[in-house]
Amino acid sequence: MIELGVTPTLIQPVILCGGSGTRLWPLSREHHPKPLHALNGERTLLQETGARCAGIDATVEPLVICNEAHRFMVAGQLNRIGAKPKVIVLEPQGRGTAPALTLAAVHSVTADDPVLLAMPSDHVIVDREAFRRAVERAAALALQGRIVTFGVPPASADTAFGYIRAGRAVAGPPDVPASYVEAFVEKPDAAAAQSYLASGDYYWNAGIYAVRASVWIDAIGNFRKEILGACERAYRRGCRDGGFLRVEPGAFGECPSDSIDYAVMEHVVGAPSGPEAVVVRLDAGWSDVGAWDALWQIEEKDAHGNAVHGDVHLADTKNALVLAQHRLVACVGVDDMVVVETPDVVMVARKDKAQAVGKLAAELKRSGRSECFAHRKVQRPWGTYDSIERGERFQVKRIVVEPGAALSLQMHYHRAEHWIVVRGSARVTRGDETFLLTEDESTYIPPGVKHRLENPGRLPLEIIEVQSGSYLGEDDIVRFEDAYGR
């Protein structure tokens, strides 16, 4: 399957599931970032990335690097599409793509020194067959000791991307061209971007890399030895936790933040010795979906250029992107606009100002707005909860517990809870007693009493929880037993 003598088992997909995606706020938030959302279809961007891994070689399980806070969502989403990661390496905090790839290399190099295919989990790639062919070419080059990046033929003079200047061609199959890299170029201004497009010598930088594990370790050790040292210590002192591998927080906290390009690739280009930097052409309908205008570009549109999701009604509206999650959104006389509605936020922007949404989200975060961190509906390893109403001394939640799942055995000091079963069956532990509740039945949990909610059935359990008390924060919880290691 793989060209030039590269066997499938030598390619190890590495899914980099990090970043915050603030330019896609209010859909993407710190506790539920961009890769974990479905933006262009039924599956999330992470799930689409997992499916691409299977398209390369279904027998090789991907290695995933993600933030510890997102571990259950990442594992759950991959499990739902039948993807079984070899391991999910947990970072205590984000440190950029260079440390993430270094952790993957340290984990992999002692096995068969595979070619690591490092892929961000938040991209859209339409043509999987073209992607597979580009990966085959890149893997063959990486097996020879090169560090390979992927370049996308620019469709416009876009100033939101970094660029790669391609030099002389690398010998090989003509259907997937490859060239030596002459330079990595920062995001240009409009005039420079137009000149890059006109020259035909530049690619958009896709942020995808192929490199042998040992080659990467040598390169990062040569150019950023402090990153390699911190990652090796954090990995060596880490521990297994089921399907997760937790690196040691103290050692990883000493690791500098940096990207693959800054840490290594820019130093490799033109270096008198060491690995060569090569770019493989990726002509596969790639998009980083970096902002709302990029999503509009890849969406299906009506005759007036509008792309819509949810309960949307448009009149005299053109070239708009409108997403409604919770209620009817109606637009009249709107052109070139983005409207995003969630249960707790409505965001409106001109499409040509979509890149500025990230700055808006950062300002809101600095002001302490909770809407930057989490959605109203919050994912948990056992299911979800949705805070549907809140007032002075009370809060109402809709809680859904998946079949066979259970919340931790816990206690609250400052609040009481009233549970009403709407659908399914609940096994309730309250103090020293355990009993079953069915639909339309309820119970009361006083403050200071140990309790647990479980779903013993085969269908989701849905309850309405009414909290009352002097303090209703999520940190008013004492866990005594927890199957999820929190």
Image (spheres, rainbow, N blue to C red):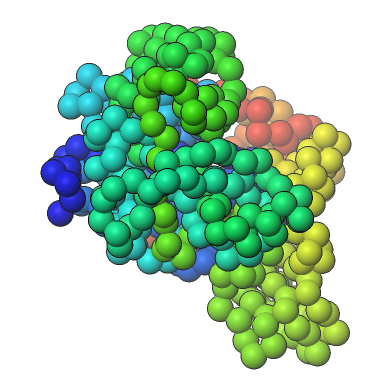
Left or right, residue 59 beside residue 201: left
Q: Residue at x 42, y 46 (%)?
A: 168
Q: Nearer the viewer, residue 286 or 472?
A: 286
Left or right, residue 211 beside residue 323: left
| Above or below for 151 versus 422 | above
Image quadrant occupied by the N terminus: bottom left
How many numbered circles are shown? 0
Q: Residue furthest front?
A: 168
Q: Nearer the viewer, residue 449 or 339?
A: 339
Q: Residue at x 82, y 34 (%)?
A: 366
The quarter holding residue 89 reads top left
Q: Residue at x 29, y 48 (%)?
A: 171
Q: Nearer the viewer, residue 447 or 183?
A: 183
Q: Residue at x 33, y 33 (%)?
A: 146
Q: Quick check: can you spot residue 219?
A: yes
| Above or below for 445 versus 291 | above
Q: Position of residue 45 (x, y in %)?
A: 47, 55
Q: Position of residue 80 (x, y in %)?
A: 34, 54
The quarter holding residue 60 reads top left
Q: Quick check: can you spot residue 68?
A: no
The quarter holding residue 457 reads bottom left
Left or right, residue 60 beside residue 235: left
Q: Position of residue 153 (x, y in %)?
A: 51, 60
Q: Position of residue 41 (x, y in %)?
A: 48, 68
